[in-house]
Image (cartoon, coloured by chain):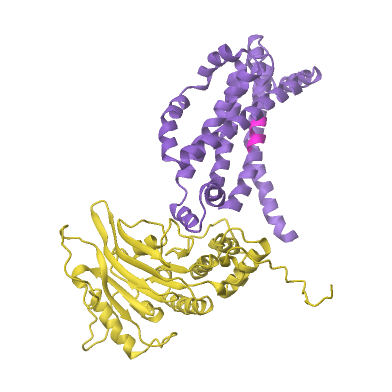
Chain colours: A yellow, B purple
Amino acid sequence: MPPTVPTTPTTRLTPLTSGRAAPSPAVATALPLAFEQVTRSYGGRTVLGGIDLEVAAGEIVTILGPSGGGKSTLLRILGGLDRPSGGRVSIAGSPVAPYDPRCAIGFQEPRLLPWRTLAQNVALGLPRGLAKTDAAQRVSHLLELVGLTHAAEQRPREVSGGMAQRASLARALARNPGVLLLDEPFGALDALTRLKMQDLLLDVHANAPTTVLLVTHDVDEALQLGDRVVLLGSRGDSRSDSREGSRDESDEGQDGTVVARVVAVPGERPRDRGDARLAHLRAELLAGLGIDTHRNPPQRNPPQ
Amino acid sequence: MATDLTRPLSRRWGRAAVAAVLPVAVLVAWQLLSTSGLFTITQLPSPELVWQAALDLGRRGLLGQYVAISTQRVLIGFAAGAALGIVLGAFVGLSRFWAAFFSFTLASIRAVPSLAWVPLLIIWFHIGEAEKVILVAIGAFFPVYTTVAGSLRHVDPHLIEAGRAYGYSGARLFGAVQLPAVLPSVVSGLRLALAQAWLFLVAAELLGASMGLGYLLTQSQQVGRTDQTFLAIFLLAILGSVSDLVVGLVSRVATRRWS
């Protein structure tokens, strides 16, 4: 047989059975998701009182809300770490499974295994059944993406909080998630590191377009990162969103968080952090969170 | 490199010198008291007599035999008890059901003093190796069981949840998260278990043995050979500390690697 096909020695990459196990994270397929009338109560306390939300594939949606308002619960339900008491949650049309493999979660704390190096921690997120060489290649690619190549062999306790959080993000990306869930991932970082991490997340998203649901308590962060900002609040707060009629209020008092507002953020990312339209939205959102923005004469920083 | 090593090394020698002060003082006091005429040889044999007893037993081949059989009983009993302790401890530490099922019974058994088992074990297994090894295994079981169960129950739930969120469950989760997380405390449980194994060995050999260090203790007491009694005690001290030293080294490596 004449050598018509030039074979390079590196073309040993056999096609893998599942598409998500490809060596580059750039092939992640972003998936759409939907919450339909999702409720969650613990004992007698209703945390989520009927959440309706649809997120398109590849969209970044940031979620704001009062503390204890069920923001994390929402993410945990979507990731299959918790189950809704009622309603339906689906990713790409099919219901969420326990610890759904289509999702990856970045927790508020990095939650790295202290006895593993950063590289080994990132490898924890890899899909199963990946060939060893592919796995190593993927881990080093991800470490490069989050700027941790130099720290690959260090242990979590030897690195800063920002580095640990970047490793945690790389681990989540290693799963090649259709939906990336981030639960106040930068909340514990200092202000400057947080800004850098926000830019990093946008870089990563540009590289590997996945759907991102990000919970934050920081209004600026929500506006800087999101295509849309979802403001959670109690039922009385809901204004512009389409909530048909009044469902019978069978349980008195606490009836859980609902989507109070959905705000489409204007402009292209990365956004100018000083954009006047954002400042206006920021004031609106803070007001929605029950924070007085002191907008009249002396402009002060709002309390966190 | 050399400058790096000299300081810790000299410090180590310094520590060894400090540690040696008390044994040397005791030895000197012992020598003085035993030759002062205040005590009979049966009450307090001199260090030299104890040394002679060691040489004598050594010449007759008994010293090596006793040390070997006692060490063998400890090692086999320790291995069996520790293995069972790890398995049951894992069940109890990982599952609420098995915790409820086992903990009460095992806590009651644990309350039984070591010597209380000996008559029953002799009735069931007769005087022999099995009876002694089983007693040692009982002794080694409990420290391992308790530390494994306790430390598994207290593995950071955040790490376990992260493991699950990344698709780990069952044996894979155990191997990737829970086992490494508890390894340092398991090793310290093993260390306690080994010390306890030596305690239970002596209990087993005091009653109904024909060789071993515990046998040497009772035998020498009955015939008034206090030099041999001293010898047996020294040998137990040495064997116990050597085995502790070995597990201590393992423990240091485990702590450095897995925490």
Location of residue A201 in the rendering, given as x and y in whole percent from the top left corner: 48, 76
Q: Point out the stretch of residues depicted in magenta.
A: B238-244
Residue B4 lies in the magenta-colored region: no
> As drawn, which residue projects farthest toward the right?
A2
The answer to whether residue B248 is seen in the rendering is yes
The answer to whether residue B36 is seen in the rendering is no
Q: What's the magenta bit mostly, secondary-structure-wise?
A: helix
Quadrant of the rendering where the N terminus of chain B is positioned: bottom right
> As drawn, which residue projects farthest toward the front?
A1
Where residue A156 sits, quadrant-wise, is bottom right
Which residue is at 71% across, 21% downward? B66
Is B73 left or right of B99, judged from the image as shown?
right
Location of residue A236 in the rendering, given as x and y in whole percent from the top left corner: 18, 70
Residue B239 lies in the magenta-colored region: yes
Location of residue A17 in the rendering, given as x and y in whole percent from the top left corner: 61, 63
Compared with residue A181, is residue A222 higher up or lower down, i.e. above or below?
A: below
Q: Nearer the viewer, residue B192 or B228?
A: B192
Which residue is at 78% across, 21% downward? B58
Which residue is at 27% across, 60% downward? A47
